[in-house]
Image (spheres, rainbow, N blue to C red):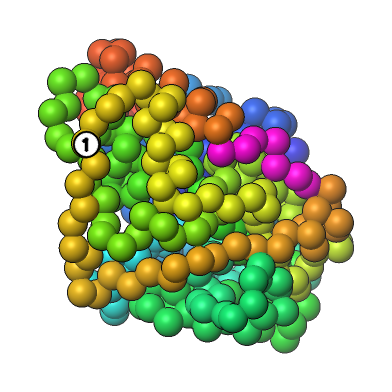
Amino acid sequence: MANILVTGATGFIGAHLVKYLAKQSDDEIYGLCRSLKNESTFKALNLNRLKNVNLLFGNINSRSIIDEFFVRYNIDKVYHLAAQPIVQTAAKTPVSTMDTNAFGTLNLLEIIRIIKATTNKDIPTYIMSTDKAYGTHNKLPYTENFALNGIDIYSASKVCEDTIARSYAFNYDLSIVIGRPCNIYGEFDFNWSRLIPTLAKTCLEPNNKDDIILNEGSYKHVREYMYVKDAVVAIKMLIDNIDKTKGEAFNISPGITYTTEEAVQMFLALSKTNKEIKFKRKDKTFKEINKQCLDSSKLKNMTGWSAKYELFSGLQVTTSEYKRWFEDDDLLNSCTSHRANTELCGRKH
């Protein structure tokens, strides 16, 4: 049995990863977060009911707190997903974004380095990067040997994180692997500024009279969309194969591209809505890349991973789960009046 630390455990991807890890084995899962919001994927997935899930409160930038968690819970593996993940927010708060994404990662890896230097314990560690780190290139799809060219604040912060992780793996021979996923979607993402959650709230929330509002100029942008359950399987497989993946970065994507229009129309058909789509001007600081796609053959060849969901099948589950959540008073109440459980807040063994 292993003791696993998941940073960013109450976020969308982090919570789904916690659920997957907790149900795969009897490993003890310690989820690190700064706070637990009323609308939380962690709550919506009822992770408080899982006996081997423990929630720890702390800031990834606090060396003393994170170091204490490593010692107290004898951490054996780390999945580092804590980040400021929103492009628009990053553009408005560049210093705090860099502080969390770059220096938070540096703080975590320095603790892991010191543990190996003093105890010879090598902790397998996954670092979450992004396809946005590549920026723009004339040739597509991106492969892992493409230069990282993050041109906006969010992307630049993830380039820093990605580079720091690879440098620590190289300099100190640490078992670190980096994932660069495409856009990840799925049920219970409560960031209402993202495309799929925006559609879910507008189209599936009972009595919601709002029009569908999208960013002007982005309707023909090309992206890959990966269902969250495919993403967490890939993340775990990178750690499970750390003897082969150590020190490397891996693209994570299903290999199928869609325009924003295609994704939106697919969602509208599944949600059975005929709402009008309106477009708004983007904030001046919000910069988008017109076309992105990844070559994930390195991941597939090295780990055997492949996506199980295409966009339509993933959206089928997503729309069904969001609809159930919006219409079930018990589920809504569990997110708005979730009772704190002291067993989840830094349980000692």
Classify mark 1: residues with Cα within 10 Å, few (<14), some (14-19) or many (20+).
few
Query: On the picture, is 23 further left or further right than 13?
Result: right
Residue interval drawn in magenta? 305-311
- Residue 324: in magenta span: no
Quadrant of the image occupied by residue 244: bottom right
Quadrant holding the C terminus: top right
Quadrant of the frame with the N terminus: top right
Q: Name the chief secondary structure element in magenta.
A: loop
Left/right of residue 106 with respect to residue 89 in the rendered view: right
- The residue under label 1 is 276
Q: Position of residue 304 (x, y in %)?
A: 84, 48
Q: Nearer the viewer, residue 293 or 112?
A: 293
* Location of residue 175 (image quadrant): bottom right
Q: Is residue 70 visible?
A: no
Dot 1 amino acid type? Glu
Magenta span includes 306 = yes
